[in-house]
Image (tube, rainbow, N blue to C red):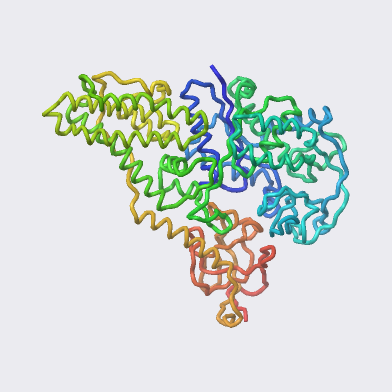
C-alpha cells in the first residue's frame, strides 16, 4: 500500500480562521486526503498552529500574559473552526509542544555541525526606550523599494519584497513608536546561496510543481539568493541550542516548517508507529500563495542541507476576495468561519469555495453568487435529481431497484457515462484540479435530470413499464456513483445519500463508485438534502457586512471643531470588560457614568486585556449616536491616544462632565 504525507500551512495563532484560509489551503487539502484514503492509500494528514514570532509576543506584552497562553486561546479557536468545516486531520498539534522544540533544536544543531549555519556580526535596530534589539517585525516604516507605508522589518505587504529591518525608511519601534538606532549584533545565518543551483535544478525539473509555484519561485532564483538570517534576539521562541547564544531564538521560519514533522511525530508516538515512511514515499504541501517563497525555496534548501527527501509537490491556493474587494480584518471586511457556520451548513461552504474558480486563480466570494450556486446547482440539480429518483423508486417499485430489460441507445449512453465518471473525477483529483472534478459531477447530475425528464417514468410505468424500470434502475446507479465521488467534497451530505440507499459509507471505496447495485436492492424514503437560501437571508448577510464596514470607518472618524461644543464628555468607570469574539482589536466595555451605565465597543484589545482595563476611570463620549461593531451595540466612545491607543485617565468624580 502506497503511503502519502499531506500537510497544510500552519495557521498563525493570533486570530481565528476566515473563508480565505479555507479556500486556499484547508478544504483542498482535505478533499485530497479523503480521496486518497478512498483509493486505499495510507494517508497521514497533519497540521499545527504556528505559535512563535513577533505578533504573539507583542500581543502577550500588551495583555500582560504569557505568550503561550495567548497562542493557546487562538489554538482552540482555529481547531474548532477546522473541525466545524470537517477538515479530517490525523493530527493537529502546536509548535509550543515539547516534541517540536526537541526536533527543531536537533535540526538546527545538525545543520550547524555540517557547516550550513554560521555566525556573523550584523547591524540591527536597537530601541533605547525598550532597552533591547528589535526583531524584524518589531520595526515598521516605509518600504525602501516601493515606498509603501507600514512595511515590516522583514517584508513589504505592498510589493511583496523581503526586507532587512535596517533598510526601512522612517523606522519606528512597534511597541513604543520611538525611532531605533543601529547597533551591532551577532546572529546565525543559513547558507541559502549555496543551494541556488540545486534549487533551480529541482524547480525546473519538477513536473509536479504547478505553474504558479514554479514561475513565482524562479523569479527569485534569477535575482540571486542571499544567505538567510536564522536567529532573532527575543525571549519568545525556541532557544538556539549553542553555548554563547543565550537570549537568541530560532527564527520562526527556521522552525515552523518542522511543525509538519513534529505533528507527525506526535501522531506516531500516540499510534506507536513511524511517520518517516510516509514522508519518504510522497509528501504534498498545501499552502497559500503568500508563502510560496518560503516553501519552494527556503524549506527545500533546509531539507537538502539536512539530507531529507524533497516534497513531491507544493499546491498553492490563490487569494479569495470578498464582494469584489480585498479582505481586510482590520476594516471588518471579512467573513469568519465560525460566523458563517452558525448559519449555513459546512458542505455548502465547501462546495461553493471549490466550484467558484480553479485553485490556481484568485476568486471572489459573493453572497449573491453563493445563493445562486447553492439554489441552482445543489438544490435544483443535485438535490432534485436524487429526490425524484428515490421518490419514484418507492412509489412505483416498492422501494427496490427494478429488474431491467434491454437498454436502448439512450440508456446505454447514460450507463457508460455513469461508469466513466469516477475515473474522470479521479484524474482531476490526482492532478489537484478540484474544481474541474466537481464540475464533472454536477454536469452528469444535470444530464441525469434530462434523462429522467426525457424518459418520463411517471407515464411509462403504465404504458411501457420496462422503460420506466430501466430509467429508475440507471438513475439509482448514478445516485450511488454520485454519493461515492462526492464524499471528498461533501463529507456530511454524501453519507446521507448513502444512508437513503442503505449503503455503509465507511466501507465504500473509490473503486466501488463504478460498480452497479443489483436489482432488488432496497431504497428508503428520501428526505430533502439541500434547502434553498431565501433572498432575505442573503440580504441580511450583505447588510451586516456593509454595515460593519461603515461602522468600523465611522468609529475612526474625527469630529470637526464646530461640533466640539455638542460633545458630552463624562468621567466614567469601567465596571465590565470582555473580548469581542472574532476580533483581535475590540473590547466590549460597560461604563458607569453615575446616572446610567452605557455599553461601549472600543478598539483597545491590542493595548489592554479585560482585566487590565477593569475599574479604570476614563473619559467617555456619552452622547455618541449608537452604532454596531461585530453586531454589538456601542453607545459611546472611550478617549484614547491615536498613536498607541493609550486610554486617557482622570481623577475626576464619576459622572462629572468635562468642559
Provide residue 25's location: percent of width, then percent of height: 55, 39
Provide residue 457's location: percent of width, then percent of height: 18, 31
Residue at image location 57% in from the left, 78% down from the top: 567
246 left or right, relative to 492: right
11 left or right, relative to 393: right
Q: Is residue 331 visible?
A: yes
Residue at image location 50% in from the left, 58% down from the top: 630
111 vs 348: above or below:
above
163 vs 49: above or below:
below
Provide residue 530's location: percent of width, then percent of height: 33, 41
Q: Quadrant of residue 109?
A: top right
Q: Is residue 611 visible?
A: no
Most extreme residue toward the top is 1
Residue at image location 77% in from the left, 32% down from the top: 195
Provide residue 134's location: percent of width, then percent of height: 79, 51
572 left or right, relative to 409: right
Number of numbered discs on residues: 0
Residue at image location 67% in from the left, 72% down from the top: 651
Q: Quadrant of the C terminus?
A: bottom right
Most extreme residue toward the left is 463
Amino acid at each position: 500500500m502506497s503511503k502519502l504525507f499531506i500537510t497544510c500551512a500552519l495557521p498563525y495563532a493570533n486570530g481565528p480562521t476566515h473563508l480565505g484560509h479555507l479556500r486556499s489551503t484547508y478544504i483542498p487539502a482535505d478533499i485530497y486526503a479523503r480521496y486518497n484514503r478512498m483509493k486505499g492509500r495510507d494517508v497521514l494528514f497533519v497540521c499545527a498552529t504556528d505559535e512563535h514570532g513577533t505578533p504573539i509576543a507583542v500581543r502577550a506584552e500588551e495583555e500582560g500574559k504569557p505568550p503561550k497562553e495567548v497562542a493557546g486561546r487562538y489554538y482552540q479557536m482555529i481547531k474548532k473552526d477546522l473541525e466545524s468545516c470537517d477538515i479530517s486531520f490525523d493530527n493537529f498539534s502546536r509548535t509550543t509542544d515539547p516534541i517540536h522544540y526537541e526536533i527543531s533544536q536537533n535540526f538546527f544543531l545538525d545543520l550547524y555541525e555540517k557547516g550550513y549555519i554560521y555566525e556573523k556580526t550584523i547591524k540591527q535596530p536597537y530601541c533605547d526606550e525598550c532597552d533591547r534589539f528589535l526583531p524584524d517585525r518589531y520595526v515598521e516604516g516605509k518600504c525602501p523599494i516601493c515606498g509603501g507605508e507600514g512595511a515590516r522589518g522583514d517584508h513589504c505587504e505592498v510589493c511583496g519584497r523581503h526586507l532587512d529591518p535596517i533598510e526601512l525608511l522612517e523606522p519606528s519601534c512597534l511597541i513604543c513608536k520611538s525611532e531605533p538606532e543601529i547597533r551591532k549584533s551577532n546572529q546565525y545565518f543559513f547558507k541559502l546561496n549555496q543551494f541556488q543551483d540545486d534549487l533551480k535544478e529541482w524547480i525546473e525539473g519538477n513536473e509536479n510543481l504547478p505553474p504558479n509555484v514554479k514561475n513565482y519561485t524562479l523569479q527569485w532564483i534569477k535575482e540571486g539568493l542571499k544567505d538567510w538570517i536564522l536567529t532573532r534576539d527575543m525571549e519568545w521562541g525556541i532557544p538556539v541550542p549553542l553555548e554563547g547564544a543565550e537570549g537568541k531564538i530560532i527564527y520562526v521560519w527556521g522552525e515552523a516548517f518542522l511543525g509538519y514533522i513534529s505533528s507527525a511525530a506526535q501522531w506516531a508516538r500516540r499510534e506507536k508507529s513511524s511517520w518517516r515512511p510516509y514522508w519518504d514515499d510522497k509528501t504534498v504541501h498545501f499552502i497559500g500563495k503568500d508563502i510560496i517563497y518560503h516553501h519552494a525555496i527556503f524549506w527545500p534548501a533546509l531539507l537538502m542541507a539536512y539530507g531529507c527527501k524533497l516534497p513531491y509537490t507544493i499546491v498553492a491556493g490563490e487569494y479569495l476576495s470578498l464582494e469584489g474587494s480585498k479582505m481586510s480584518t482590520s476594516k471588518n471586511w471579512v467573513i469568519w468561519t465560525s460566523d458563517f457556520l452558525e448559519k449555513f451548513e459546512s458542505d455548502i461552504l465547501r462546495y461553493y469555495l471549490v466550484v467558484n474558480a480553479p485553485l490556481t486563480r484568485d476568486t471572489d466570494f459573493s453572497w449573491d453568487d453563493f445563493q445562486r450556486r447553492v439554489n441552482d446547482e445543489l438544490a435544483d440539480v443535485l438535490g432534485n435529481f436524487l429526490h425524484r429518483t428515490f421518490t419514484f423508486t418507492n412509489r412505483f417499485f416498492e422501494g427496490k431497484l427494478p429488474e431491467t430489460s434491454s437498454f436502448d441507445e439512450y440508456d446505454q449512453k447514460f450507463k457508460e457515462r455513469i461508469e466513466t465518471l469516477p475515473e474522470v473525477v479521479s484524474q482531476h483529483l490526482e492532478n489537484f484540479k478540484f474544481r474541474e472534478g466537481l464540475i464533472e459531477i454536477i454536469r452528469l447530475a444535470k444530464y441525469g435530470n434530462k434523462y429522467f425528464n426525457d424518459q418520463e417514468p411517471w407515464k411509462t410505468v403504465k404504458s411501457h413499464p420496462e422503460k420506466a424500470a430501466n430509467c429508475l434502475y440507471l438513475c439509482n446507479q448514478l445516485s450511488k456513483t454520485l454519493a461515492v465521488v462526492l464524499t471528498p467534497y461533501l463529507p456530511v451530505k454524501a453519507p446521507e445519500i448513502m444512508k437513503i440507499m442503505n449503503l455503509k459509507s465507511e466501507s465504500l471505496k473509490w473503486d466501488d463508485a463504478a460498480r452497479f447495485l443489483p436489482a432488488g436492492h432496497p431504497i428508503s424514503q428520501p428526505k430533502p438534502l439541500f434547502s434553498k437560501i431565501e433572498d432575505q437571508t442573503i440580504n441580511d448577510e450583505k447588510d451586516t457586512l456593509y454595515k460593519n464596514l461603515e461602522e468600523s470607518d465611522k468609529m475612526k472618524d474625527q469630529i470637526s471643531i464646530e461640533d466640539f461644543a455638542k460633545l458630552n464628555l463624562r468621567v466614567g468607570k469601567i465596571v465590565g470588560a470582555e473580548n469581542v469574539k472574532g476580533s483581535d482589536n475590540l473590547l466590549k466595555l460597560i461604563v458607569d457614568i453615575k446616572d446610567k451605565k452605557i455599553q461601549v465597543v472600543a478598539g483597545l484589545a491590542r493595548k489592554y486585556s479585560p482585566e487590565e482595563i477593569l475599574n479604570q476611570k476614563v473619559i467617555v463620549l456619552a452622547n455618541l449616536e449608537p452604532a454596531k461593531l461585530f453586531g454589538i451595540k456601542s453607545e459611546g466612545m472611550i478617549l484614547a491616544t491615536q498613536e498607541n491607543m493609550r486610554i486617557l485617565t482622570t481623577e475626576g468624580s464619576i459622572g462629572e462632565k468635562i468642559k
